[in-house]
């Protein structure tokens, strides 16, 4: 029953895109504003007129920090300005967390997920990306 509700929700649609390797987002067709995290109503206009689009998956690190938790290696938490005009929280992998810098270009990579957690987007450095 929970799976059926998830599949019909905006979040369920987002997860289905993630399973295909796509970073999806919505756009309010009334004012062409990008919407991320998935919603039923656009937060700026209040409109229900939302359509799905797929990002090219490129962005720029807007802010970054390193979390030092007990019994785990340090990891990065970053705000990414995605080229299509929305900002999202994620992490940058495949690089020492202390080397993630504001202004760094990154590209999306889907973390595959498992039976306990659905897939989700993370980022890696975008070598030579513009």
Image (cartoon, rainbow, N blue to C red):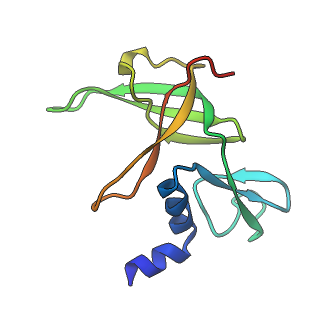
- Residue 114 horizontal/vertical position (percent): 30, 56
- Residue 53 horizontal/vertical position (percent): 70, 55
Residue at image coords 61%, 53%: 24
* Count of labels in the image: 0
Residue furthest bottom as drawn: 1
- Residue 74 horizontal/vertical position (percent): 27, 26
Which quarter of the image is occupied by the C terminus?
top right
Q: Is residue 69 left or right of residue 97?
A: left
Residue at image coords 72%, 50%: 34
Q: Depth check: 130 or 64 in front?
A: 130
Q: Depth check: 128 or 15 in front?
A: 128
Which quarter of the image is occupied by the N terminus?
bottom left
Q: Note whether 61 is above or below 84 in the view shown.
A: above
Residue at image coords 66%, 40%: 56
Q: Is residue 17 left or right of residue 90?
A: right
- Residue 5 horizontal/vertical position (percent): 47, 79
Residue at image coords 39%, 79%: 2
Residue furthest front as drawn: 20
Q: Is residue 28 left or right of residue 76?
A: right
Q: Is residue 53 left or right of residue 3?
A: right
Residue furthest right as drawn: 30
């Amino acid at each position: 029953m929970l799976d059926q509700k998830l599949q019909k929700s905006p979040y369920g649609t987002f997860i289905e895109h993630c399973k295909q390797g796509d970073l999806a987002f919505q756009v309010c067709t009334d004012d062409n504003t990008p919407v991320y995290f998935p919603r039923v109503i656009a937060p700026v206009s209040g409109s229900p007129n939302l359509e799905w689009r797929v990002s090219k998956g490129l962005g720029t690190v807007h802010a970054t920090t390193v979390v030092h938790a007990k019994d785990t290696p340090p990891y990065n938490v970053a705000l990414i300005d995605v080229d299509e005009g929305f900002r999202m929280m994620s992490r940058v992998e495949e690089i020492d967390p202390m080397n993630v810098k504001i202004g760094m270009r990154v590209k999306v990579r889907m973390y595959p997920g498992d039976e306990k957690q659905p897939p989700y987007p993370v980022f890696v450095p975008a070598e030579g990306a513009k």
